[in-house]
Amino acid sequence: MMMMKPKTLLPIAAFVIACAPGAFAQHDQHGAAPPDAIGSASVKFQTSCAAVVKDDFNKGVALLHSFWFPEAIKMFEGILARDPDCAMAHWGIALSNWGNPFGGLKQGRTIELTKASIDKAPTTGSPTPRERGYIQAVGQLVSSGDPGSHAARIGAYETAMEQVSRDNPSDTEARIFYALAVAQTASPADKTYAKNLKAAGILEPLFRQMPTHPGLAHYIIHAYDAPPLAEKALVAARKYASLAPAIPHALHMPSHTFTRLGYWKESIETNRRSAAAAVKSSGGAGEELHALDYQTYAYLQIAQDKAARAVVDHAIAVVGGAEGAAAGAAGAGAFAVAAIPARYALERGAWAEAAALPARPANTPFTEAITHFARALGAARSGNPAAATADIDRLAALRDKLRDAKDAYWTEQVDIQRRVALAWQTFAEGRKDEAIAQLGAAADAEDATDKSAISPGPLAPARELFGYMLLEAGKPREALAAFEATMKKEPNRFRGLYGGASAAAAAGDRARATAYYKMLLEVAKESDTQRPELQQAKKYLGS
């Protein structure tokens, strides 16, 4: 994995997890933590299992609601040890093995583990008709081992959970799991956000009735995890961390909303607490790395480059100290391993540094693509377009691997990265009109989709990069339009604000230039690094 030499690790570790001793004491100002610290007091999941396991079953479901899957499995396995006839414990283990429903295409091993668990449920004890509905619904998730049928299977699960909810109108948990199934099937290409709003329409009234239920707060954040909707999640986001303060994902999840809105300090704080909680847990390095990725992204937006560097170094130490566990981590953890150093270079405009990032195979093509995209973009933008060719070719190969695996979402995302890198190579070779057409088309493609839930944002928004290309091509008014579109979608991004200010100044629009430079200085008012962009802003405003 990453081979950069860590700096002195004790100060770095202290910096990143300084809040660890108080991770469970520092609760959100909007509510006190429940005594169990996982939010199970509000979970009332009825089962036919023995009365002695009732409380533990609710704890297991609470853990499921906050995506703490390793601990949920332990809880449900403990239930089976005390009540071998508890069919729904197998349901809980199956959903835990399935993992994050927003984590994208599930691979063979995940399907196998989920199927092995859920297949035991119908013949364990005597499940009630209601319980059989839950069990049969999860069976839809694993009705085929073909990754290409993923969309059809999660759609069938949604339909099955809708039926469970209808058949059991007094079952609040059925409605909650149904809403999650609806949100899970939302298409990133649907800009009406129909599924998101449908899920939120189920969850919001329940949240008003049960404001301490962890699943409701959590899934509202997911339902509104889109640029035009994010502000609607703010109440839930500010509440959720206090509902399950022992759970890394619960502490991290509010930052999805904070990132969408450009609330960088709040994102940093909640991810600090998440990383600290992850260190205390037994869930592996993935949760900590995921929090560190969001933390790095936020620090870079406020020009706290030294703080970001400390997090980068700590992430390297986590990878090295996990005995390879992080290298094999799936999903968000694996993504973070590649994304953190790439972000550190790209967000600072350190193009030569990006070009020199060490490239190595990752456990999934889309995580490997991160480094090749950064390298290609860095090479092209630092005046060495020929050096970008190998990385652009590798992006094409990785795209094809994803297509062969029938992973449509990441096929498109990696191809957008390839097209962006190719456009900058074309621009660096002097074919500016061709490059502008290429990058404009890539930006349109990116605008038509959305980022994955495992990432705080694109490594470098295509529309923002398009603005910089137009600016360098002497088209400041067109550049300004591109930057303003980016600022609307990704508010308070450092490079977006600086680009907008620069384009406005070049276009002779002093009012806009002044406004954007002032916004930039406000966002970065606690910077720990004097970036040239900040010096330029001060110079312009002082003239």
Image (tube, helix red, strand yellow):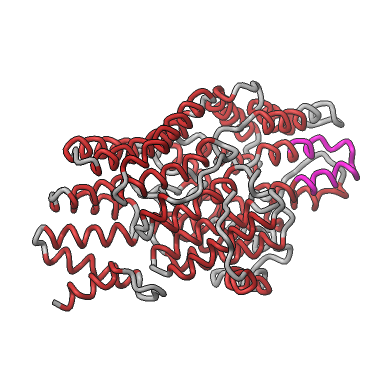
Q: Which residues are magenta?
A: 73-91
Q: Main secondary structure of the magenta part?
A: helix
Residue toward you, 258 or 145: 145
Q: Is residue 203 magenta?
A: no
Question: Where does residue 84 sit, x and y in percent of width and height?
Answer: 89, 38
Q: Quadrant of residue 425?
A: top left
Q: Is residue 14 left or right of residue 197?
A: right
Quarter residue 525 falls in: bottom left
The structure residue drawn at horizontal position 45% and vertical position 37%, both measured from the top left corner, is: 195
Among the 4 quarters of the image, the one containing residue 94 = top right
- Front in this rendered view, residue 219 or 353: 353
Q: From the viewer's perspective, is 281 left or right of 194? A: right
Residue 127 position (above or below residue 46): above
> In this orientation, does residue 190 appear?
no
Q: Is residue 458 left or right of residue 54?
A: left
Residue drawn at x 25%, y 50% as measured from the top left: 485
Q: Position of residue 147 (x, y in %)?
A: 58, 25
The C terminus sits in image quarter: bottom left
> Picture coordinates of residue 279 (x, y %)?
68, 62
Relative height, residue 433 to residue 321 (above, below): above
* 89 falls in the magenta region: yes
